Structure formats: structure tokens, C-alpha cells
DNA sequence: TTAACATATGAACAGTTGTTCATATAATGA
DNA sequence: TCATTATATGAACAACTGTTCATATGTTAA
């Protein structure tokens, strides 16, 4: 099978090879969806800012609201999304609920993102 | 300044310390916006699937469309977004335009994401 | 030039998202 | 119990996003 000489886009047979390779390596549909869902969570600057605060300390909701100059409700809604996606965890102490980072992936992912945008 | 005994949310003074620390470490507004913008690009399963194909090979638009079973137009629109954010680069060869990954951060970011969602 | 093929793009539409507002739930102390 | 404080949440609304459709641009060969 000499697929070097094949020109693009008017062929029928040769691309089946690419399709086969891709189908082997591509994660299943559900995993792709979850992956996109995860990155969607990082794709909002309010949530990014919340994560940056949590890089520094374990913080309660109203302190987050005050620090980021946003309403308690807006912060609370976003914290829910962060928690659903296991990027933060929470702990109740009296009337307050304290949030902190769930694991190290959060830092790694954000740092890789920063490296990318700082590149040029 | 004994800020250990301070209870949450009814204080005025002590939180200024947190605010100060956060303001020091938090990237500037524009950078946060760009960072969120970058992750937004990863936050769509069509674009994720395009990137997974490009992990395997340099591919032209119509092959991407065929492989992913989507219209050429839809793929083209998404490639534009990927290119604007410097995740892919392109090269024209005759009538076709071949796309490939722009740099290694793409793989790293996606792999970190996969690790996170596969964790539990 | 003209026809045919490959890709890019603008407009439109439906579906999604983030914030606000009002209100509910939860914990504490009097 | 009741009032107060802290947090969570549902509904509504405006803003944004991804796909489709029609069409434009770009390249090649005849």
C-alpha cells in the first residue's frame, strides 16, 4: 500500500487507514465529552480567579466574594461548578464553608495554560 | 496581628491581608482573560477531536471532516479558532490546506485533563 | 478564461452560559 | 423559639457559542 503518492480529498480507500488509526487512539465519545466539560470549567475568568485565590489559602465564600469584588451568589454558583468537576473541595466550619483546591492537576493545567499564552 | 482568632465574614481589617496577597500573586486582568480564552478553546468536543486526529498526523481539512463525520464548514470554523489561539498551524499544498499541532503544550494540557477525569 | 475542487467565511438560529434577584437552607447565639 | 449571619439555589435574562446554509476565495488543469 503506497499511500505516499495519494493526493488529498478525492480518494476513497487510503483515508480508511487514517480513520482506523484515529479510531484506535481516540478516547471513547463519553471521555471526550467529559474532557471538554472539564476544560469548559477552566474557560471562565471568574472561576480562574477563584482558583488563583485558592492557590494561596483555604477561603470561605464571603471572603472570596469580597476579594474578587463579586456577589456572594455569583461566587456560590461558580463554586458549585468547580466542586461538581472536583477541582475544589469544601469543609463546613460553623456558619461558614471553606473551599480549597482538590488536587494538584489544577495547578498543573493552569500553569501549562500560562506557559502557552506567555510564549509569544 | 493575630489573625488566627478572627472569625469569618464579619471582619473588616484582617481580610485586607488576604486581598493584598492575592493581588500580588494574581496575574493581571488581561492575562486571566487570555487564559480563560485558551481553555475555552479546549472546552468543545469537536475541537478536542480535531486535536486528537492531529496527534496522529498532519491532515487536510476534508480528511478531518471525513474522519470526524462532520461538514467541511463546521471543521473549517473550528480550525480557525484553533489557529487563532495558536494550537494548530497550517500549510497550503496545492488546493489543500494541511493542519498540524503548533506545539507541545497542547498534548500536555490534554493529558493533564485526561489524568484528572480518569482519576476516580 | 473556464470548470472543478478545496477551503474560508458571513448570517442566522437554536442551545448554552454567567450574572442578578429573590428566596430557601443551615448554623449560631440570645 | 427567634433573629442573625453564611451559603445555596431556582428562575429569568442577556450575552455568547457551534452548526448549518449559502456563497466567496483560492488553486489547478484543461
Image: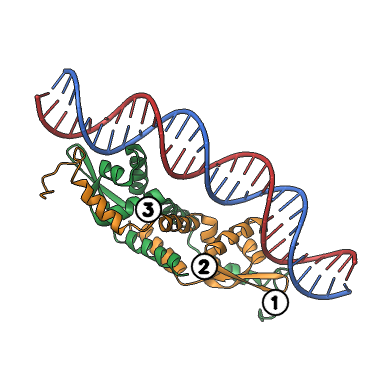
Chain colours: A green, B orange, C red, D blue
Q: CA distance from mark 3 to mark 2?
A: 34 Å
Query: Sequence-wise, which precedes: disc 3 or disc 1?
Result: 1
The percent coordinates of residue B1 (x first, y second) are 11, 50
Q: Position of residue B63 (x, y in %)?
A: 65, 66
Q: Quadrant of residue B114?
A: bottom left
**In front: label 3 or label 1:** 3
Q: Residues within 10 Å of mark 1 (few under 14, many from 20)?
A: few
Q: CA distance from mark 3 to mark 1?
A: 46 Å
The subunit letter for the residue under badge 2 reads A
Residue A100 relative to residue D24: left or right? left
Residue ID for mark 2: A24
Is residue B106 among the parts visible in the rendering? yes
C-alpha separation, residue under disc 2 versus residue under disc 1: 22 Å
Question: Disc 2 vs disc 1: which is toward the camera?
Answer: 1
The residue at 34%/37% (across/down) is A73
Q: Assign a secondary structure to mark 1.
A: loop
Amino acid at each position: 500500500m503506497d499511500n505516499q503518492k495519494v493526493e488529498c480529498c478525492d480518494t476513497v480507500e487510503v483515508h480508511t487507514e487514517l480513520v482506523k488509526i484515529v479510531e484506535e487512539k481516540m478516547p471513547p465519545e463519553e471521555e471526550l465529552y467529559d474532557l471538554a466539560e472539564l476544560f469548559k470549567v477552566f474557560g471562565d475568568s471568574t472561576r480562574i480567579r477563584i482558583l488563583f485565590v485558592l492557590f494561596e489559602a483555604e477561603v470561605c465564600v464571603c471572603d472570596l466574594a469580597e476579594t474578587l469584588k463579586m456577589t456572594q451568589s455569583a461566587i456560590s454558583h461558580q463554586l458549585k461548578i468547580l466542586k461538581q468537576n472536583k477541582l475544589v473541595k469544601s469543609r463546613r466550619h460553623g456558619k461558614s464553608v471553606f473551599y480549597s483546591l482538590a488536587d494538584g492537576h489544577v495547578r498543573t493545567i493552569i500553569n501549562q495554560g500560562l506557559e502557552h499564552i506567555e510564549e509569544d
